[in-house]
Amino acid sequence: MIKVTLREKKITKGRKSLYLDFYPAIPNPKTGELTRREFLGIYIFEKPKGASEKNHNLEKMRLGKSLCQKRENILSKPEIYDSLEKEQLRIKELGERNFVEYFIKLRDKRSGSNYSNWNSTYNYLNTFTNGSLKFNEVNVVVLEEFKDFLLTTKSTRSNKVNLSQNSAVSYFNKVKAALKQAFREDILQIDMSSRISSIKTKETRREFLTEEELVKLIKTPCKNELIKNGAIFSALTGLRFSDIQKLKWGEIEVIVGGDIVINYTQQKTKGVEVLPISKQALDYTGERRAPNENVFEGLKYSAYNNKDLYNWIDNAGITKDITFHCFRHSYATLQLLNGTDLYTISKLLGHKNIKTTQLYAKVVDQLKRDSVDKINLNL
């Protein structure tokens, strides 16, 4: 029986060439002379740098091993299925699996706003594929078509406007993340996520509510009082939805002198924060309960609750495109407009990098430029 081994040989530019080593030697098909080597014309990086080169090495080593086993099978002529043939059968079966169903399983492992984002992605993916896309059908062409679909399709929130580019960025990245996971689980033999570029983020103005608009909202009834209280609380504290959702009564403390602070761990960054809040903000938390109970018990991020939020904003006569996260933007922007320095706001928001906070300064600068244009002397 002839043994075939996959080996590596150093070549130029920090690479290695893959070749097959035969024992005992076999006749060269062209010259008839005995040979121990057959170069495959495949190279790998000796010291891979970054994800792209590492993925290249993984794919080429898999291909080399496959060719090695196949060559040995041909030379040895086994009578029954060998390990390679079984592996090829397994890969074929995996290729028949539905990527959309796989995406659903990944979605269902998420929670809160992350689940909502994955679910929104699923809705667009399901529309694009009609619920069926086999793994062996996933290629660069299909992914580019899905990218174009996201950039041109109507928003599920309103069939009058297209899906925003930044939403398309987020949803396409979720699909790329699912493909990356499938590659890690060996369902995909090629890392398709590295073969396709992401959609470029479009710099947009961060919408916020003025003090007058917040007062309007406070005076406007909302079908979902929990959403209303949570949103106003966010505007008065700058807390994210995820942190409001998990906030416990034991994390709200009244310290010496009557000041109120929240001691909490950020859901997103895992940073431990001490956030001073106003008495007015505390008024929107309701009656104090046990320390281990949630302050906003029952608050959920869902399409149904979002509908209540949008209706409430519409009923207040506000035409801006406002989401729950915009209440956090409102807190930061109003702090800036009222003279709070950027460093302090960065700490209040729990930002690790002040560059993130500087985005709000751009909003205020634009407001200043807009106000200049309001003075126009008619000579």
Image (tube, helix red, strand yellow):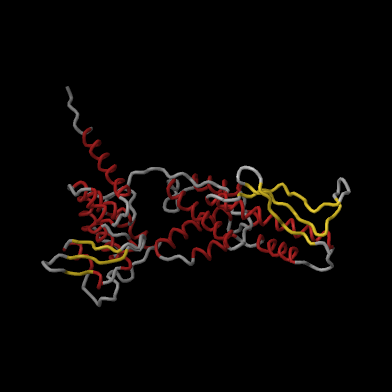
The residue at the far left in this view is 257
Residue 262 appears at what percent x and percent y? 23, 66
The residue at the far bottom in this view is 290
* Left or right: residue 277 compared with residue 42: left
Q: Which of the 4 quarters of the picture holds residue 259?
A: bottom left
Point out the image quarter for the C terminus.
top left
Q: Residue at x 49, y 63 (%)?
A: 107
Residue 14 appears at what percent x and percent y? 60, 46
* Left or right: residue 131 compared with residue 331: right
Residue 368 appears at what percent x and percent y? 23, 38
User: How many labels, in total?
Assistant: 0
* Left or right: residue 240 compared with residue 134: left
Residue 166 appears at what percent x and percent y? 42, 48
Q: Which of the 4 quarters of the picture holds residue 272?
A: bottom left
Point out the image quarter for the N terminus.
bottom right
The residue at the far top in this view is 379
Give whichever of 195, 199 is nearer the camera: 195
In the image, residue 244 above or below residue 27: below
The residue at the far right in this view is 32
Q: Residue at x 75, y 60 (%)?
A: 69
In the image, residue 204 above or below residue 60: above
In the image, residue 280 above or below residue 207: below
Give whichever of 89, 102 is nearer the camera: 89
Q: Residue at x 61, y 57 (%)?
A: 133
Give whichever of 180, 134 is nearer the camera: 180
Q: Residue at x 47, y 53 (%)?
A: 171
* Left or right: residue 21 compared with residue 305: right
